[in-house]
Image (tube, grey):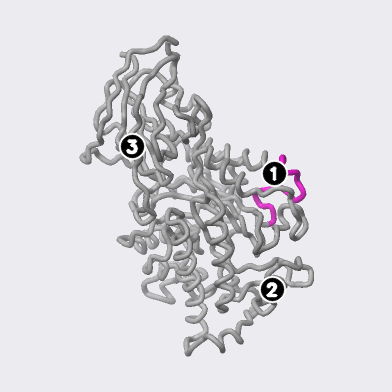
Amino acid sequence: MHLRPLFVATVVAVATTGVAYLFGPDAKADPQKRKDSPAAARAVSATTATTSPRCPADADFPKRQLRGVWIATVRNIDWPSKTGLSPDRQRAEYVRILDQAVSRRLNAVFVQVRPAGDAFYKSDLEPWSEFLTGKPDGDPGWDPLPFLISEAHKRGLEFHAWFNPYRAANDANTSRLPANHPARQHPEWVVKYEGRIYYNPGLPEVRDHVTKVIKDVVQRYDVDGIHFDDYFYPYPSGGAKFNDAAAYKKYGKGKSLADWRRDNVNTLVAQVDKTVHETKNQVKFGISPFGIWRNKAQDPTGSDTNGMSAYDAIYADARAWIKTGTVDYILPQLYWSSSHRTASYSTLLPWWAREVRGTGVQLYIGQALYRVGTKDEPAWTKPGELPAHLALNRKYPEVKGDVYFSAKQLSTNPLKVLDRIVADYYRRPALLPLMKERGGKAPAPVTGLQAANSTLRWRSSPGAAAYAVYRVAGKGDDCATATARNLLAVVPATGAAEQSYALRGNGTYYVTSLDRLQHESAPAHVTVGG
């Protein structure tokens, strides 16, 4: 059973000249809140330090953790709130979502840019999305994507462009599609199923088109990642059959229909992975599959669950993507409570942790923020259910973060669950998990670090996309930057020759340089006061 609507997500930290966004709902809630300080220059000592490899881990303050949110555009779930808004209104709504994400100490957004064979950006390959103007291929009067990306980056949020690979249109009547829609230009590419049009995954031409669309975005826009959700072959509906018999006859090559369909999806995933990284190696590629790969009843190595099998029903073989390394991360949607009878979160989480163990593929968990406060299950009426998922995650080092569906709940904050998550699990910002295969290296350490007039200042480092600012009471030590316990903020670089951050009381401040993938330099430090 499919338990949720479509989704997207993005991550960012923000700084303006002289000010850093302090990743928290309220500075008053921060145990290291800023204290009044004299305006006169303080006596400081600045040096460059190294971090000892012997520093103890701190499970309560993980230094690297993806914290994302999906921003769904299909059917105007999250953004824009409705069709036909002016560009200024669209921009204002989007910025509000980003600011809400930053206030909850998130660091990534996954934004749906291709919900159904259409585009939330200017494209020569596919028409404008109807979810912008209300009209298929209606020109919104601006190209949203550069703005969506730049505003995320200004706030320190990583931007993942979210694509649905096979959904061609939400209307099965191709005559109502724009003349430039590929599904209308190539009717032989599509299959009509349950009132919608899908690109046929079994056709090489379809795979090439989807790959070309994604390559175009990677080439022209400064995205940090490419993201697929759980929609591959359509979810089964009412016993209807997906009519791909002609393609199977032509390309099946003796495989069973099910194996051939899975191979079609696997081939696309590998093709997209290769193309993305050949175009820009630093761009990440990952998928958010349905939470059940297979049940034990179907495969003894499957999970001890009794729900729909993505492997068998929609031909999505996440295990294959992990084993072949054709994804950088896997983000299963574990949208069930820990007490669910047939698909328990507490059963599925360790299963996915075992799947990625030792593979180099990172594991993030899709969390059902949208279910909190609903009556879907009794457990979701309790404010502690979703936080309990994060508590369980900490027992599995394979889990490198969480992404929440969806952005709408950032403002509604059901059962005040986000307040609780921030207070108990996101008390400090976090750097992004590193991916060795995506390259990058630590920039040069900052220089010229000094404190004066209640402000910390330093010279910009070549290649730095952001800076991490830490503070400890007293003199500090070599382990001051080993975890996020002392991390105050991730300050995006402004492009100016000098960067700054408002002091938050006496102590020793450490500042490190970060590249766009957040490889971190050795720290420089300065002692302020006592």
Q: Earlier in the sequence, mark 3 or mark 2?
A: 2
- Specify the label residue 194 is tagged with: 2
- The amino acid pointed to by label 2 is Glu
Label 3: which secondary element: loop
Please state the extent of the stretch shown in magenta in the rendering: 75-89
The nearer-to-camera label among 1 and 2 is: 1
Residue occupying the point 36% across, 24% down: 449
92 or 6: which is nearer to us?
Answer: 92
Residue wearing tag 1 = 90
- On whether residue 77 falls in the magenta region, the answer is yes
Q: Earlier in the sequence, mark 1 or mark 2?
A: 1
348 or 446: which is nearer to us?
Answer: 446
Residue 69 in the image: x percent, y percent? 54, 48
Question: Looking at the image, is 421 positioned above or below residue 318?
Answer: above
Q: CA distance from mark 1 to mark 3?
A: 39 Å
The nearer-to-camera label among 1 and 3 is: 3
The nearer-to-camera label among 3 and 2 is: 3
Q: Is residue 173 left or right of residue 334?
A: right
Q: CA distance from mark 3 to mark 2?
A: 56 Å
- The amino acid pointed to by label 3 is Ala
Residue wearing tag 3 = 444
Instruction: Decide whether the magenta segment is chiefly helix, strand or loop.
Output: loop
Q: Residues within 10 Å of mark 2 (few under 14, many from 20)?
A: some
Residue 303 in the image: x percent, y percent? 41, 67
